[in-house]
C-alpha cells in the first residue's frame, strides 16, 4: 500500500516529491498518531568530553562524524 501512495506522490509532484525513505518515516509517524510535520534533526551522541567543552564554550560547533 505504501508503494502505491509513494507512486501517487511521484505522479503528482514528479521531481519535487519526497524520497520514499521520508515517506516511509512519515507514514510510520502518522500510523502512530504523530501528525507533527516539523523538521526533526538527526540525533547525535557526542562523547562526554565534547559535551563538556560545548557547555562551557558556546561558540563551538558540532561538526562530528558519527
Image: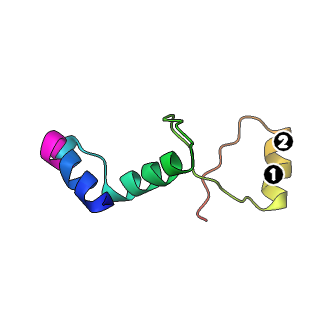
Q: Looking at the picture, how far across and down is residue 49, in whole percent?
A: 84, 58
Q: Looking at the picture, how far across and down is residue 38, in whole percent?
A: 51, 34
Which of the pair 47/9 is nearer the observer? 9
The image quadrant of residue 45 is: bottom right
Q: Residues within 10 Å of mark 1 (few under 14, many from 20)?
A: few
Q: Dot 2 corresponds to which residue?
A: 55
Which of the pair 22/30 is nearer the observer? 30
What residue is at 22 percent from the left and 46 percent from the top? 9
User: Is 21 rendered above or below residue 31?
Assistant: below
- Callout 1 touching callout 2 (CB < 8 Å): yes
Which of the pair 59/40 is nearer the observer? 40
What residue is at 49 percent from the left and 54 percent from the top? 28
Q: Secondary structure at mark 1?
A: helix
Q: Secondary structure at mark 2?
A: helix
Way the structure is coloured: rainbow
Which of the pair 5/59 is nearer the observer? 5
Q: Quadrant of the N terminus?
A: bottom left
How far is disc 1 from disc 2 in space, using C-alphas?
Answer: 6 Å
Q: Dot 1 corresponds to which residue?
A: 51
Residue 31 horizontal side relative to residue 62, left or right = left
Can you tell which mark lies on residue 6? none
Residue 60 horizontal side relative to residue 32, left or right = right
Q: Residues within 10 Å of mark 2 (few under 14, many from 20)?
A: few
User: Is 36 rendered above or below residue 9?
Assistant: above
Stretch of the chain drawn in magenta: 10-14
Residue 16 horizontal side relative to residue 47, left or right = left
What residue is at 18 percent from the left and 40 percent from the top? 13
Q: Looking at the picture, how far across and down is residue 36, in whole percent?
A: 54, 35
Amino acid at each position: 500500500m505504501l508503494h502505491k501512495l509513494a507512486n501517487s506522490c511521484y505522479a503528482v509532484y514528479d521531481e519535487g516529491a519526497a524520497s520514499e525513505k521520508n515517506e516511509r518515516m512519515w507514514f510510520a509517524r502518522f500510523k502512530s498518531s504523530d501528525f507533527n510535520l516539523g523538521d526533526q534533526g538527526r540525533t547525535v551522541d557526542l562523547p562526554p568530553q565534547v559535551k563538556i567543552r560545548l557547555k562551557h564554550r558556546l561558540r563551538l560547533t558540532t561538526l562530528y562524524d558519527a
